Amino acid sequence: MKAELLMLAPLLADYQARLDERFQRVCAFDEASRRALLSEGPERFTTLVTNGGEGVPPWLMQALVNLRLIAVNGVGVDRIDLEQAHARGIAIVTTDDLLTDAVADQAVALLLAQLRQVCLADRFVRQGQWPLGGFPLLGTSLRGQRVGIIGLGRIGMAIAERLQPFGVVLAYHNRRPRAACTFAYHADPLSLAAACDILVVAAAGGSGSRHLVNAQVLEALGPNGVIVNVARGSVVDETELVARLADGRLAGAALDVFADEPQVPEALLGMDNVVLQPHLGSATLQTRQAMADCVVRAVISAH
């Protein structure tokens, strides 16, 4: 008899098929099906597959008394109770470094789309407005802009490397300075924001970084400032962000992540000074294939 494998999030079909050859799949993609597991013998699962957005609800992890492995199709572990996992000896495997390039590409694409009005101009053409007159707005050049990166890890550094040929001035904030890094270091986000025109958020999520970009940081960025977030929605105080975009205390934003995904603040939907994406940082075919392969290999090797 095949061992049962709990899936809290799907994989690409070809990679799911590889798991189906070895395991009996039990999918619990929504709250109701996860709650139902409590009365259906949760002790039978030793391995589960999830992603960074779903994580593992603490109550479910507690119910999975024989859980030994959590395979994450992503790098985010902020929605996993790491203390509980450590105390119980539950291994956590992520797809570290496989999505670095895709997320960094997305950050630069979002920034350019925001500065050059790409989405707004696209709508202008599609709505048939061009024959009535030229596009009424001018974009902003990236060259010469002061760009601050919050979180200069693998992804943050990959973003910096992509931005350098544009002739920007780079600075960053980490918990500590990065060895041999020539970019200006700022000991806190407030100092970084005050020295920048553009703030790119690439910090890890979790309680330690919640609202790292708060009202004071956004105030320091100022009315001409632009923010790009490809990290986690929780890193930015979303209420403050929306309010400042609405009343002109912040010039623009390009957002791939939100505080309560997939819910997006309604006020953002009508703003022309924002670019919005449905958390697509790692969403290239090549990257998702590599991530799924990593998850499959981790699950099979554990059995």
Image: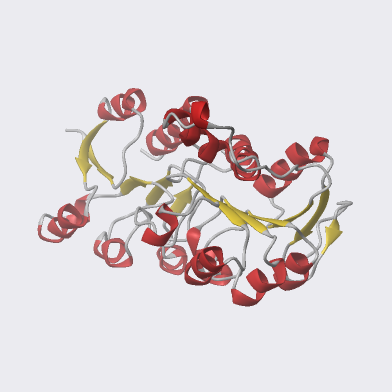
Q: Residue at x 80, y 66 (%)?
A: 186
Vertical placement of residue 10 versus 45, above or below? above
Vertical placement of residue 145 versus 95, above or below? below
Q: Nearer the viewer, residue 213 or 33?
A: 213
Q: Is residue 145 visible?
A: yes
| Residue lying furthest front | 132
Q: Residue at x 64, y 44 (%)?
A: 111
Picture mark count: 0
Q: Residue at x 53, y 61 (%)?
A: 205
Q: Quadrant of the N terminus?
A: top left
Query: Is 85 positioned to the left or the right of 9 in the image?
Result: right
Q: Residue 263, percent across and down?
A: 34, 57
Q: Residue 40, percent across and down?
A: 11, 55
Q: Nearer the viewer, residue 289 or 145?
A: 145
Q: Nearer the viewer, residue 60 or 2?
A: 60
Q: Is residue 287 visible?
A: no
Q: Quadrant of the C terminus?
A: top left
Q: Residue at x 17, y 60 (%)?
A: 35
Residue 252, located in which quarter of the rendered image?
bottom right
Residue 295, located in which quarter of the rendered image?
top left
Q: Residue 55, percent across and down?
A: 38, 55
Q: Nearer the viewer, residue 265 or 100?
A: 265
Q: Residue 52, percent across and down?
A: 44, 50
Query: Is 153 positioned to the left or the right of 296 in the image?
Result: right
Query: Is 242 positioned to the left or the right of 164 in the image?
Result: left
Residue 133, located in which quarter of the rendered image?
top right
